Image: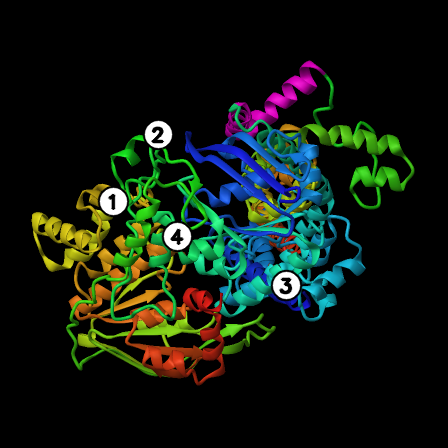
């Protein structure tokens, strides 16, 4: 390897949260060559973002970072660097592209100013805005960030970073907050620019398929330790660590078998990070033996050519085989009755500022939508942001009044809703048991009967009923989402509305949630409206897919029919935007 | 912007109308007879009756209110029972002194708020600043005023403790003596006016400093955790620059709103502070009007303060929209 641009040796990081210090990174080694693209893959809490921040020396001071080991960027040491030296490093050697472009630009400073802050001339600013494909760069340079879309902001942030011609770019999930249709463009832009300037990219993601599309090498991180490191193609084709294998099999795309449930990794994780001499993954590992509990596996060469930290690498292939036989969906309780009927729904919202005489312009969000969902049936509603899908869900839930049209529910009973942000959908100061109990109160059950129903509901969603006494803050985000499902089904509703319930989840969690929702609606005979921008998830969960564009249903039908022969242009874009792991393999 | 101003001015007129109605009702229900108090206790009943007729006090209430409003629109706030002057003239005479005091107090309060907020931001882990702010915030204004007067004027003699000037019989074109001294080329007048301003303005500025300072420091703590601050440090910018250019402006909105609110509370404090420091302004005028049951004067001043408060709120909103372009007026 040429002189590495990044060289990490024995990196240990401890961070404090609420006064409790815990090890977040536990002995990381990594070398990156100039211009190389390395994907850093792991679930939330694996420490992948911490690596990115540590390289830039940006770990937040309030978490009192305790760092040991070495991070060398070109010739400069980051660990223990003085503020001035660190500033110089950030100016010239390493830049970052953040996960959420919406918050990453100063809302009260023009784009041009923010770009010029590190010494770009105004000509260079305009040149860079053009290079990242922004229309009308003069106008954008004068604009404030809030007038730009998420994709445009991410382009600005990429321009800002690449203009410094850094040796290393750290891209922390740069597309998760963006619309699917823009994601591919942003990734292409990033890799093209990096190739031109020979900038190495450390690409942080939870999605192995995205990693497979753009990286040379991949580092799989689990619990603050490296699980596997190697050539991306090799790791994707034949993983040598049970966790990489699990990530691969839990992943779903447009080729996944939709007659079966998804293979899911065990996701119950101890929020405290286990430290010491054992394999971090052993509690969740199907191959775990007594050795794994007593010894820490070192990274070592495996038969496939990658390096994995596992005593049982040779048995990983059999794990992959068994994963292909996930259980089929249960037999649905179906019926011809409508769980939901939407009839010619129209809705407009006031837009822009009102004039002096109080007259407001209106934007039409929904322009006459008809939709029926039968009991036991699931319809997935897809569409880009601004297409009106959330508004339609709110109208179907009775939370928003339609301007015109009718909403009718089976038996006139309002539906239950599962929201995207499960943590925000739970009251922070009530135990989860109490929050579920609220739905049982009208039934006139006595306390012990209520407790029994709560325990049953929690069991149904795979949560230990003992956690009924826990507050939402004591649970993980995934557990909170399952609690909101438990709350919705404790009194089985005839209709369940889900608003992007998996969009903030990593693969293993998303797979489990899809399994849970898909099973429950069949067992309980609920109609379900599943709003998402992820076509792969829509195909797996739903019996029909409805495509919403500019407030109108442009397409509705069987998932595989829609995906193999998309009619509307927007549907075509959506289909091509889904990263496909197996198509990728075939191409390699 | 223009339509915002128009809308706000229309709102101002509406609020003033409502206030004038309340003031009018208060005037009508008090048992005192304006004609009697104007004519004097020894005037014969016929004179008083004639006066009542002339003043329109025998008209139906609605007609009286109509003429009250029409007088208001011509700037006529009625006549003070105590000074026997039109209240509008009194307001013009004593207003500048109070306005000068308010401006000084707001400037000092804002400066102190910055100092407190920075002290809290830099000494975050020590509870000293918090306790200090709590202590300052919990001292009632009459005590602050008296303590300042006692120590800095009476015991130490560092600052004068009463009136606006050492120089007798000064009058200037604007009534703001600091400004008048400069305009007339008499800097000693400005200096004396500033020294006299110091103690009452300081007393008034303490509650402003504590509340605005607290709001500023919590806004700063929040803003400095935002992702764009991380973007800025990721660009290799210096910490001081980031704080000033990226932090402060984004933290401005809440403290500005608090400042506007404090100006509203300032009016009550003015009565006390002007009384303690014998400051010849509207506060003292109101206190004296109270003492002589001069209700028309008190209500006239209330009307003026109300209008002023609405103007301040409007200025705060304009300032907020200047600080944050996402707030459209």
Label 2 with label 3: CB-CB less than 8 Å: no
Up-down relation of residue A61 to residue B303 (above or below) = above
Looking at the image, is mark 4 or mark 1 nearer the viewer? 4
Q: What element carries label 3?
A: helix
First along the sequence among labels 2 and 4: 4
- Distance from label 4 to label 3 (Cα)? 71 Å
Quarter of the image where the N terminus of chain A is located: top right
- In the rendered image, is residue A398 in sight? no
Q: What is the crowding at mark 1: few (fewer than 14 residues within 10 Å), some, or many (at least 20)?
A: some
Looking at the image, is mark 1 or mark 2 nearer the viewer? 2
In magenta, the rendered stretch is B128-156
- Distance from label 4 to label 1 (Cα)? 41 Å
Residue A64 picture location, percent across and down: 51, 31
Asked if marks 1 and 2 fall on the same chain, the answer is yes
In front: A12, or B95? A12
The residue under label 2 is: A277
Q: What element carries label 2?
A: loop
Say left or right for A248 vs B109.
left
The residue under label 3 is: B9
Say left or right for A157 vs A256.
right
The residue under label 4 is: A239
Say left or right for B143 vs A472.
right
- In the image, residue B139 lies in the stretch drawn in magenta: yes
First along the sequence among labels 1 and 2: 2
Which residue shows up at 61% across the image and 60% down it? A191
Label 4 with label 1: CB-CB less than 8 Å: no
Looking at the image, is mark 2 or mark 3 nearer the viewer? 2
The residue under label 1 is: A431
- Distance from label 1 to label 2 (Cα)? 36 Å
Up-down relation of residue B202 to residue A444 (above or below) = above
Which residue shows up at 71% across the image and 70% down it? A136
Residue A175 picture location, percent across and down: 52, 60
């Amino acid at each position: 390897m040429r002189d590495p641009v990044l060289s990490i040796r024995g990196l240990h990081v401890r961070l404090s949260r609420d006064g409790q210090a815990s090890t977040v990174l536990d002995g990381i080694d990594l070398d990156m060559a100039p211009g190389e693209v390395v994907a850093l893959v792991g679930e939330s809490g694996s420490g992948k973002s911490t690596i990115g921040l540590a390289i830039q020396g940006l770990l937040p001071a309030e978490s009192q970072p305790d760092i040991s080991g070495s991070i060398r960027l070109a010739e400069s040491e980051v660990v223990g660097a003085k503020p001035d030296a660190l500033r110089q490093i950030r100016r010239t050697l390493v830049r970052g592209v953040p996960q959420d472009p919406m918050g990453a630009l100063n809302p009260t400073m023009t784009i041009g100013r923010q770009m010029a802050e590190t010494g770009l001339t105004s000509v260079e600013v305009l040149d860079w805005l053009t290079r990242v494909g922004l229309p009308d760069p003069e106008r954008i340079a004068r604009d404030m960030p809030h007038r730009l879309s998420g994709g445009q902001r991410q382009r600005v942030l990429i321009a800002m970073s690449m203009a410094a011609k850094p040796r290393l770019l750290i891209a922390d999930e740069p597309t998760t907050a963006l619309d699917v249709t823009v994601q591919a463009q942003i990734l292409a832009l990033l890799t093209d620019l990096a190739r031109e300037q020979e900038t190495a990219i450390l690409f942080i993601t939870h999605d192995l398929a995205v990693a497979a599309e753009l990286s040379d090498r991949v580092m799989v991180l689990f619990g603050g330790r490296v699980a596997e490191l190697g050539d991306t193609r090799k790791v994707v084709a034949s993983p040598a660590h049970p966790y990489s294998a699990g990530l691969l099999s839990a992943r779903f795309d447009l080729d996944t078998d939709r007659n079966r449930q998804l293979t899911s990794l065990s996701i119950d994780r101890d929020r405290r990070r286990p430290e010491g001499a054992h394999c971090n993954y052993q509690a969740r590992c199907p191959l775990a033996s007594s050795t794994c509990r007593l010894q820490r596996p070192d990274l070592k060469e495996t038969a496939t050519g990658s390096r994995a930290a596992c005593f049982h690498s040779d048995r990983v292939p059999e794990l992959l085989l068994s994963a292909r036989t996930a259980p089929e969906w249960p037999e649905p309780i179906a019926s011809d009755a409508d769980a939901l009927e939407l009839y010619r729904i129209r809705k407009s919202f006031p837009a822009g500022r009102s004039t002096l005489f109080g007259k407001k312009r209106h934007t039409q969000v929904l322009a006459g939508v008809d939709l029926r969902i039968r009991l036991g049936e699931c319809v997935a509603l897809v569409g880009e942001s601004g297409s009106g899908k959330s508004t339609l869900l709110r109208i179907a839930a009775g939370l928003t009044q339609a301007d015109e049209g009718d909403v009718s529910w089976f038996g006139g009973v309002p539906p239950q809703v599962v929201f995207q942000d499960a943590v925000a959908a739970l009251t922070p100061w009530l135990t989860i048991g109490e929050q579920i109990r609220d739905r049982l109160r009208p039934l006139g059950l006595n306390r012990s009967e209520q407790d029994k129903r709560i325990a049953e509901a929690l069991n149904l969603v795979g949560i230990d009923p003992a956690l009924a006494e826990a507050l939402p803050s004591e649970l993980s985000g995934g557990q909170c989402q399952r609690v909101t499902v438990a709350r919705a089904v404790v009194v089985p509703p005839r209709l369940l509305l889900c608003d992007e319930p998996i969009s903030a989840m990593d693969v293993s969690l998303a797979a489990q949630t899809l399994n849970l929702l898909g099973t429950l609606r069949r067992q309980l005979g609920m109609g379900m409206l599943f709003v998402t921008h992820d076509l792969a998830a829509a195909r797996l969960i739903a019996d029909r897919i409805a495509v919403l564009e500019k407030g109108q249903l442009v397409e509705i039908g069987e998932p595989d029919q829609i995906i193999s022969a998309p009619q509307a242009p927007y549907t075509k874009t959506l289909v091509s935007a889904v990263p496909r792991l197996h198509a990728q393999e075939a191409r390699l | 912007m223009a339509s915002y101003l128009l809308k706000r001015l229309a709102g101002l007129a509406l609020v003033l109308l409502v206030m004038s109605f309340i003031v009018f009702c208060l005037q009508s229900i008090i048992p005192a007879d304006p004609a009697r108090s104007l004519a004097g206790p020894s005037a014969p009943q016929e004179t008083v009756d004639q006066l009542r007729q002339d003043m329109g006090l025998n008209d139906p209430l609605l007609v009286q209110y109509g003429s009250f409003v029409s007088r208001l629109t011509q700037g006529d706030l009625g006549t003070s029972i105590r000074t026997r002057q039109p209240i509008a003239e009194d307001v013009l005479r004593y207003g500048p002194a109070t306005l000068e005091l308010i401006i000084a107090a707001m400037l000092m309060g804002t400066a102190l708020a910055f100092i407190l907020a920075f002290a809290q931001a830099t000494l975050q882990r020590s509870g000293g600043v918090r306790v200090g702010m709590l202590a300052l915030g919990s001292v009632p204004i009459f005590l602050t005023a008296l303590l300042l007067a006692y120590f800095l004027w009476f015991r130490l003699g560092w600052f004068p403790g009463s009136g606006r000037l050492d120089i007798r019989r000064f009058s200037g074109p604007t009534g703001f003596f600091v400004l008048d001294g400069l305009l007339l080329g008499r800097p000693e007048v400005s200096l004396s006016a500033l020294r006299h301003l110091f103690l009452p303005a300081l007393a008034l500025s303490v509650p402003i400093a504590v509340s605005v300072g607290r709001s500023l420091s919590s806004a700063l703590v929040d803003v400095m955790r935002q992702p764009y601050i991380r973007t800025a440090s990721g660009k290799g910018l210096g910490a001081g620059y980031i704080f000033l250019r990226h932090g402060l402006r984004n933290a401005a909105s809440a403290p500005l709103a608090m400042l506007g609110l404090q100006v509203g509370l300032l009016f009550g404090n003015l009565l006390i502070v002007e009384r303690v420091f014998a400051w010849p302004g509207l506060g003292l005028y109101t206190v004296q009007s109270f003492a002589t049951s001069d209700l028309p004067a008190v209500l006239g001043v209330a009307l003026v303060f109300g209008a002023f408060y609405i103007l301040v709120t409007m200025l705060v909103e304009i300032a907020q929209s200047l600080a944050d372009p996402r707030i459209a007026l």
